[in-house]
Image: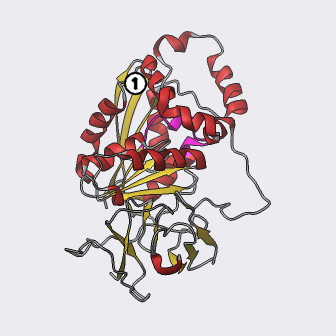
Amino acid sequence: MPMTVVPGRFTPAILSIGSRLPSFKYTARRVAVFVPRSAASISVETNSSVDSVVEKEKDILACPICYNSLALISKPNGLVGSAASGTQLQCNTCKKSYSGNETHLDLAVASGSNQYTEPMPLSTEIFRTPLVSFLYERGWRQNFIWGGFPGPEKEFEMAKDYLKPVFGGNIVDASCGSGMFSRLFARSELFSRVIALDYSENMLKQCYEFLNQEENLTNKEKVVLVRADIARLPFLSGSVDAVHAGAALHCWPSPSSAVAEISRVLRPGGVFVATTFIYDGPFSFIPFLKNLRQELMRYSGSHIFLSERELEDICKAGGLVGFTRVRNGLFIMLSATKPSR
């Protein structure tokens, strides 16, 4: 596969059809930017030696409107310093264009709209605010321990047990927030590519900043930052090996639509792992709880799961099989897989 080599400290996105890097001063490092086979290959000299050819990466990114492949239509002058600001991608079918900024590639459906804005439910919009995005990894997420969440490191170790069949492949950290699990996945070196995906621009900015502060993460060039809607994932069908969603399922506007979309992008045998809250046991005796849940969902967009069977049904409805789970109080980690052919 043709490629372009550019200098960079860490890559907000390594794409099959382009790369995006922040407009900061960089230390010498090699980053691979892949372009379509039909495109010409360019080589840019760096002050670090290129010892080997970067492993071939399969195409993964797609237009979130028609789910067809994207083409690189423009890139920054000279491809040095920043390959994010100024990078533009275009769908080969519907011709919709998408662009990158200083921190991430914007592949949301409404990307590029000048006048139109589309507010999401409160459970989504609250995480788009600068304050909550800043606080998320500075106290907000740590409070989940009161609901039985064992903490990011322990949750990561638990998730690894489910993800063993896809070690060496790519993984999408859906609703990544500030990227605490994205960094753990990258640091583990168990995956060829880690895609940190979120709808919140401010969360992705926090994710980018935390990644730059990681001194012990030597493979930052494998981390991809993408803004997208969980219900319109910008990936080709069957191109993703694993999807992880930490403490996010209850915040999605439509969990069933999101899981169906995750099923679409997973390859046969691909793995979905998620954590959320579940209110069963003694909570099932609370009068009118189901009615209260409907009202909460209507006004906040947040979902309350009342049984494991609900979560299993969501996975089955989305085309996933082999549902399994681990419980600890209100905390549940679930996993399901895309059926093998």
Quadrant of the rendered image containing residue 145 = top left
The residue drawn where x is 56% and y is 68% is: 63
Q: Is residue 324 above or below residue 339?
A: above
Q: Residues within 10 Å of mark 1 (few under 14, many from 20)?
A: many
Residue 295 position, x and y percent, is: 71, 26
Nearest to the observer: residue 71 or residue 281 = 71
Q: For the point 38% across and 65% down, which residue is it?
A: 8
- Residue 25 left/right relative to 322: right
Residue 47 belongs to magenta span: no
Work out which quarter of the rendered image holds the C terminus and state it.
Answer: bottom left
> What residue range appears in magenta?
245-256
What percent of the width, then of the height, locates residue 148? Answer: 40, 20
- Name the image colouring: secondary structure
In this image, 273 relative to 113: left or right? left
Q: Quadrant of the N terminus?
A: bottom left
The answer to whether any part of residue 267 appears in the image is no
Give coordinates of residue 153: x percent, y percent. 31, 32
Q: Residue at x 55, y 74 (%)?
A: 89
Can residue 164 be seen here? The reply is yes
Q: Residue furthest right?
A: 115
Q: Is residue 101 left or right of residue 315?
A: right
Q: Could you tell me which residue is drawn at 50 percent across and 37 percent down?
A: 248
Q: What percent of the width, then of the height, locates residue 324? A: 33, 35
Count every numbered label the image shows and give the total.
1
Which residue is more in the foreground, 54 or 332? 54
**Whether residue 315 is situated above or below residue 30 in the rendered picture:** above
Q: Amino acid at mark 1?
A: Phe
Find numbered disc 1 in the image and state the secondary structure of the residue it sits on: loop
Residue behind mark 1? 149
Considering depth in this image, is 75 or 317 the residue closer to the camera?
Answer: 75
